[in-house]
Image (cartoon, rainbow, N blue to C red):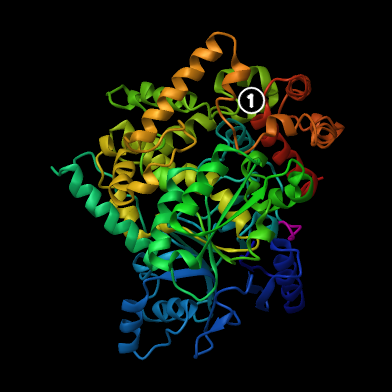
Amino acid sequence: MPGIYGFKKEISNPESQTLIEKMSYGLDWEDRFIRHFESGQGWGIGRNTLGILNKNKQPLWHENRKLILVFEGELYDTQPIKNYLDQKNLPRSTDEEIILSLYFLEGENFLNGLNGAFSAALFDHRNNTIIVMNDRLGLYPVYYANFGSTLLFASGVRALLVDHTLPRVIDQVAIQEFLTFDHVLHQRTLLEEVKLLPQGSILKFQNNYLTVKPYFHFNFTDVYPFCEPPSYQERFLFEIKRAAQRQSGGDHPKGLMLSGGLDSRFLLALLTETLGSSNLHTFTWSIPGSDDARYAKEAANKTGAKHHFFELKPDWLLKEGEKAVKITDGMGNLVNLHAIANLEEETQFAPVIYKGFMGDAMFGFGLRPRFWANYDPETEIQEHLQAYRDYRVLTFDLPEHPGIFTDTFLSNVKDGLIQDFRNGMRSSGVRQLATQRLYFDLTQRVPRMTINGVLVARDRAVIRLPFTDNDLVDFSMTIPPYLAFERKLMIDSFVQAYPKLARIPTPRDHLPLTHCAREVALRNMQFIRWHLRKAGFGWLAGPENRPYKDYHTWFRTTLRNWVESTLLSRESLGRGYLKPEKIKQIVNDHMAGKNNAVKIGALMAIEIWHKLYLD
């Protein structure tokens, strides 16, 4: 995966050159990546890139040879900034020139005005300072470690691990959080010494002193102005269309990862309007005949986009699973990383690919009716946990922990998990539980779990995410929770703007998003099938759902030997996190027919990461 890396460390010039080169290959080990790095005595800075966009050689030096910068990602809507820099007679032809010129002009105070997805780092020789920065949503993750007089940073934990002086103490709270929520919370990683740079933040390392400060905050509110839903719909359509237009630049062929759901279908409509249907490829990967495959194909055909279907094969993990673990640094469940499975074939058609990333988190996916009440502080947290149970997204629920984790492990983690969860909700600064959950999704679930699908896709493509546009995100924080509940605003806006696409069913309930004759027919068919199943004629009714993936079956068949040899090995059983007999039970129960696929996917990710980087 492309990204940046660097260090400040008390070592010689030759040692600095060796370390920066090792970090480059630690981040991306395949020769197809383009590597740009530079070093001097005690410092190094670099970036790896696919060379699709922003091909200019880096690091970029300021003309005074006192500032050096690396940048990976994209900036959008930069013309006003370019006009401003023109007035100052400063370079602004490329994204990296824009950032370097703004820093030279304004110091660290320019970032909140940038709209984009990026990470950047610069070494200011004037005051011997390393500065690392990211976009408002942290869409290009950066990890760092500060121990003694050393600072290491990179777009992947794996790049830091090439420095053998880095302490390798496992963060057991992070392990527990990952095995509970399917993602780690806050800035934790699987190593105590390594942290994730928070969203919208600046890291500064000067005179062996580290500071990390935010430049952006999610400003949700408890008080909303009076405004009728049609006005919100009008504003939403304006913002989402503008976001798509801002991210439509460049001459490269463009594609869209198209499922049967709402978010990618919304982008399908927007992008065919913006780019023209003949200029858009759509990609669907799944089991042949799945609900997603059928609905996506119908939607693509309706718009005239060039549609491509790729079979999601059971053995993709045998080919790409280890790479997916490396890219996500052991913090991504294997059953969620299949965006990489057919990526090489997709990029033959389009190296720039759009995803419907974050639309669900912004516009109400996590909201539940239980949030419309006031509770005491402790009950609030229990209600939030119960909402996770409502969606069945807890891998190992908290009541299971005493029977699964070892006594020593539980003694070590204490109440770290629940404290992190509580802090994640309460740092929203609002009282409404619905708004707390929206905040939590944007600051925890998105940058710690949902982002993993983006990271693996960046292995071969430039990934664009229109829902992350600054103005659209700002607007989302002004929407009253009742319009976010059940994604009402987004659905109503889609139906209003694109009624023909709204008549195509979605995999959620196999019904169109709008009332129409097709909805009546499908509801009648569902009613008939329900009676057939109740009468014992399920074979005639057919399956209720045709999923796009089936790890339940794959882990018991094609992937069985791989799973058993990994999780039942002496090393895996002896980690000391889970009780050995419980690991055996989880695997054996799955092989006997119980669906433990999500649990196995999480355990496999952690174990493979240990084997790759710690054993």
Q: Is residue 214 above or below residue 490?
A: below
Q: Alpha-carbon neighbours of circle 1 within 10 Å: few (<14), some, or many (≥20)?
A: some
Give the residue type at disc 1.
Leu
Front in this rendered view, residue 4 or 565: 565
Q: Quadrant of residue 32?
A: bottom right
Q: From the viewer's perspective, is 121 left or right of 35?
A: left
- The residue pinned by badge 1 equals 410
Front in this rendered view, residue 418 or 345: 345
Q: Secondary structure at mark 1?
A: helix
Residue at x-position 63% and y-position 64%: 347
Instruction: Identify the main secondary structure in magenta.
Output: loop
Residue at x-position 25% and y-position 47%: 478
Q: Quadrant of residue 315?
A: top right
* Quadrant (top left/top right/bottom left/bottom right) for the C terminus: top right
> Which residues, given as a range, are shown in magenta?
161-165
* Quadrant (top left/top right/bottom left/bottom right) for the N terminus: bottom right
Q: Is residue 178 above or below residue 358?
A: above
Q: From the viewer's perspective, is 108 left or right of 453?
A: left
